[in-house]
Amino acid sequence: MAEERRKTRQRDIILTVLKDMKTHPTVDEIYDRVKKQLPHISLATVYRNLEKLAENGMARVVNSGARQMHYDGDMSNHYHIKCIKCGKVADVWGEINLNLEQDGLDFTGFKVTSYSILFEGICRDCSLTVSGSRSKKNKNEKNTVTSIQ
């Protein structure tokens, strides 16, 4: 157990980079930034350290349904939203009443200790693209949204 919680310079740098990035980066994006400070670090080392940080409650894995996981260095309570057009992940702040009461989950036999909710929608940039191109479409043509994973 002591080995798992061992602090390393690499892990400290990876965590600092993650906390500085407010974009919910993928391991590749974190690796690109960390490599500037640690030129000899491998992608596998960054990945392993992100896993350890998540296991130790110092980072959060955001599963957006994309090929790569996104990571969040902000451990405060908040939700996430993913753009179904471009895959961007953003924070959702504020109180959202989802009416998730333990009483309603008693039939499962579990005591709920935490939960993760990912909202989906279309980000402002993609909305502008869609509305900007809408005027060029035939009025009878329906808009469709394709999920990009």
Image (cartoon, rainbow, N blue to C red):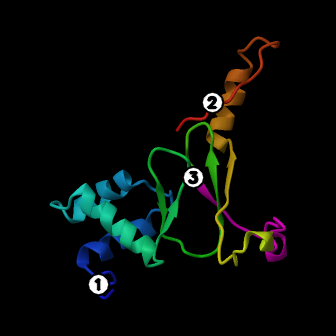
Q: Which residue is mark 1?
A: 6
Main secondary structure along the magenta-highlighted residues: loop
Q: Residue at x 33, y 61 (%)?
A: 47
Q: Amino acid at mark 1?
A: Arg
First-in-chain label (2 vs 3): 3
First-in-chain label (2 vs 1): 1
- For label 2, the SS is loop
Q: CA distance from mark 2 to mark 1?
A: 44 Å
- For label 3, the SS is strand
Q: Which residue is mark 2?
A: 146
Q: Residue at x 25, y 63 (%)?
A: 45
Mark 2: few, some, or many residues within 10 Å (few <14, many ≥20)?
Answer: few
Depth check, front residue: 102 or 81: 102
As drawn, which residue projects farthest toward the left?
40
Q: Which residue is mark 3?
A: 89
Residue 65: percent from the left, percent from the top? 55, 47
Q: Residue at x 63, y 30 (%)?
A: 146
Residue 143: percent from the left, percent from the top? 74, 23
Which callout, 2 or 1, points to the residue nearer the camera? 1
Quadrant, the N terminus: bottom left
Q: CA distance from mark 1 to mark 3?
A: 30 Å
As drawn, which residue projects farthest toward the bottom?
2
The answer to whether 40 is drawn above or below residue 94 in the figure is above
Residue 128: percent from the left, percent from the top? 67, 35
Q: Amino acid at mark 2?
A: Thr
